[in-house]
Image (tube, rainbow, N blue to C red):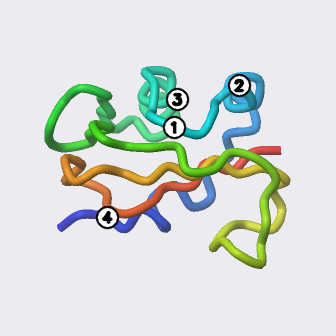
Amino acid sequence: MAKKGVNYLYGIDFTDRKAILATISVGPVHDIIATLLKEKTNDQWERLTTEGYSLVDAVVEYNGVNDLTTRPTISSYKNICIIKLGECCTEVTGRIYLHYN
């Protein structure tokens, strides 16, 4: 059974990757996201594979200041990168949240 995206990265701090995350724009996911996710989770995220931990059709929906009133996020983080996963991702569903200061 697939994990829910909202819970998948809960508690994982991406602050040490802030310099990279700060450059990511809204739109299609690039290879760097797969690399960051592999480093932090040890799961085999791939941008081009069509099953498992897939980023095919994944989109960065938001990357910026953490707004607790509109998103299910952790209040101790100033910034959030929200990625909506595509249907090819069979291990995690919905949106994933990369928290960083």
How far apart are labels 3 and 4 at the CA level? 18 Å
* Picture quadrant of residue 57: top left
Mark 1 vs mark 2, CA separation in Å: 12 Å
Marks 1, 2: nearer the viewer: 1
Label 2 or label 3, whichever comes before in sequence order:
2
| Residue 20 pos. (x, y %) | 68, 23
Looking at the image, which is closer to me, 86 or 27? Answer: 27
Disc 4 or 2, which lies upstream in sequence?
4
Q: Residue at 36% of width from left, 51% of height from top?
A: 85
At a point 69% along the width and 28% down the height, the residue shown is: 17
Q: Quadrant of residue 11?
A: bottom right
Task: Residue type at mark 3: give it.
Answer: Leu
Disc on res. 3: 4
Vertical comparison of 6 with 48: above or below = below
Mark 1 closeness class: few <14, some 14–19, many ≥20 residues within 10 Å: few
What separation in Å lies between label 4 and label 2 (alpha carbons)?
A: 28 Å
Residue type, label 2: Thr
Residue ID for mark 3: 36
Find the distance from the CA under tag 1 to the CA under tag 4: 23 Å
Taking the image as shown, residue 7 lies to the left or right of residue 4, namely: right
Label 2, label 3: how many angstroms apart (C-alpha)? 13 Å
Pick the residue in front: 11 or 100: 100
Quadrant position of the C terminus in the picture: top right
Q: Which residue is mark 1?
A: 27
User: Regarding mark 4 in the picture, which secondary structure is present there?
Assistant: strand
Q: Can you tell which mark lies on residue 23?
A: 2
Q: What residue is shown at x 64% (from left), y 30% (from top)?
A: 24
